Every structure is written in C-alpha cells, then in structure tokens.
Amino acid sequence: MTVKAFSTEWAGQFKDEVNKSSVYKQAAKGWKWTVGLVVEAEPDKNFPEAKGVVMDLFDGSARDIKVGTAADAQKCDFVITAPYSRWKQVATKELDATKGMLQGKLKLKGDLPTIVRYTKASQEMTECTTRVPVEWPDES
Amino acid sequence: MHDAGAGRVARRKLANKTVTYSDAEPSAFASMLGGLIEANIGNSPAKKKDFDSLGARVGVFVTDIDEGVTLDFKKGTLVVHNGLEPKRDITIRAEADTVMNLSNLRIGAFGMPVYYDATGRGVAAKLLQGKLRIDGLLGNLATLNSVTRIFSVQ
C-alpha cells in the first residue's frame, strides 16, 4: 500500500521492512543507539515544515520508528540532516547514503567510529526505505 | 598586557590541537576522515602510538564522488588538506564503499590488517580487480599498515 512520505503510516511500514531484513539483523548486532533523521522543509516542493524521524534501534531490530518534530530527532544519539529532496533521492536510490555523507549532502552528527563500524547496517537500512512504496508530496 | 595574555592562551590551544585542517572550509570528506582519526587515536593508546610515530603524506581519493584529501601525518599531529596535494608517499584510490571498508579492517597478530575475514577478503578482491589502487605501496608497506591501523574502527 502506498503511503505518504514521512507519515505515521510510512514509519510503520519502514519499521516492518527493517524488522523483516535478515541482512540488517546481522549487520546491526550490538547497535544500541537512537538515530534521528531530520527532514528539512522545502516549501517549493510542497514540504512546508521540517519533520523528524526518531528510530529506536537495538541489537539488529527496530523497536520503534516514529515521525515527530525536527527537535525530537535532534535529541537522538546520531542525527542525519538533509533537505526533503535529498532524502527523496536516497529513498529512490538516486543518491547513495554513504556517498551523500562523504560529500556533505547528508550531514551526520554522532560518534564517527561507531557509524563507520556499522556502515553495512546503515546501507541496509537505506535499502529498507526504498522498499516502502511512497507518495511524494511534490508529485501529488 | 591583557592582549599578550590572550595571545599566549590562543597559541597554547593551537599547539594542543592534534588534527587541524589547512582549508578554511574543510570538505565533508576531509572533516569525516579527520574526525574519524581524531576519535580513533583518542580511544586507543595503540593507535595513538602509531599516530605519534607516523610521518607520511597520504592521499585518499574516492573515485565515485571524485573527491580526495591529503593526510599529512607529522609524528603526533595531522594536517588534513582538501584535495590531493603533491609529494604524497602513498595514494589510495577506491570507491566510497571500499574506503569505508578499509576503516572496518580488523587488526590481527603483529598489528597486521586481517585479510581473511569477510571484510578483509572484500578489500583484497577490490585490490585484485583494480578497484582499489594503492600508489607508492612499494617501499611504504609499513606506512600503509600504520595508516590502516589508525583508520580502523575495529
């Protein structure tokens, strides 16, 4: 079922995809930190207000993923920030998240050795987002 | 007198900085590598020991984003430059994924990188396929191993 991007329904489907992934389960063993995704507003893309995705991830599973404010996401242990259209590029596989971070297109805050140690897990998490059928606000 | 004191404090702070950037606006890649190395040597006395004895100019070029940095190790300090600077001892060229995997190499006996586990085999395969190129390897193997140890987050 197609869901609106960064909606509560989207968060639920994203969580299901993460928990279905055996690759993620294996790669994220030992992970015990929260991750926040800040989706910056782009009013000209019909995305008028910033949103935050708060992910409670623990030892290879997603305990909770919810959509809230950007401030909620900024309180997480790791925070990745980008404008709406960049996140759309990541979710549609136009932009690889690792390359995006090295190029500064996605801004990362948090302990670098930890995030590098879990590169494979973060790549699989990106793969999970691509499996959620999404209705994008700038296309509706 | 007040200004002179302030100057001394400023100089002391600068002298204590282990990792510095030559560019006023370091690239995201430069900040990431510099930050990673700074965190690694802060977390591990063994890596700090390697860092303190390493004097070499190392280039890292990410082929699929067309961006590089030069890491100028000066026995206890590091200057990170945006882009590839001349007079490098070693230059590593690889795709972004492989560069990240280099940081995930485990370090085994005698401080040697482990090439027989999944990550190590992946890196070795890229080397054989020519997707990971290391210029200046001949005569600089010890330097490469030191750099690998300093990079490694494992």
Image: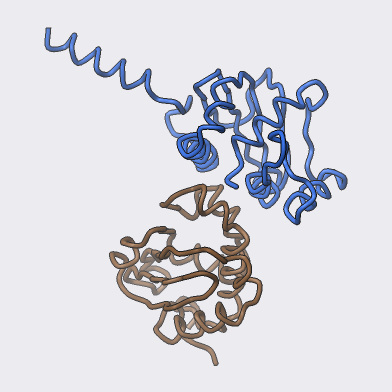
**Which percent across, then down, holds residue A123?**
61, 63
Q: How many badges with numbers are in the image?
A: 0
In the image, residue A61 sits, relative to residue B131, either above or below, namely below
Q: Quadrant of residue B46?
A: top right
Residue at 80% from the left image edge and 50% from the top image edge? B116
In the image, residue B49 sits, relative to residue A76, either above or below, namely above
Relative to B8, A3 lies left or right: right
Q: Which chain is blue?
A: B
Q: Nearer the viewer, residue B17 or B121?
A: B121
**Which percent across, then down, holds residue B80?**
53, 28
Q: Quadrant of residue B15?
A: top left
Q: Quadrant of residue A95?
A: bottom right
Q: Nearer the viewer, residue A49 or B26?
A: B26
Q: Nearer the viewer, residue A69 or A15?
A: A15
Quadrant in which the N terminus of chain A appears: bottom right
Residue at 57% from the left image edge and 23% from the top image edge? B73
Seen from this angle, which residue lies furthest bottom? A1
**Which percent across, then down, holds residue B27?**
51, 38
In the image, residue B11 sits, relative to residue B118, either above or below, namely above
Relative to B117, B22 lies left or right: left
In the image, residue B70 sits, relative to residue A71, either above or below, namely above
Residue at 59% from the left image edge and 55% from the top image edge? A98
Seen from this angle, which residue lies furthest right? B128
Residue at 45% from the left image edge and 52% from the top image edge? A107
Relative to A39, A71 lies left or right: left
Q: Which chain is brown?
A: A
Seen from this angle, which residue lies furthest left? B2
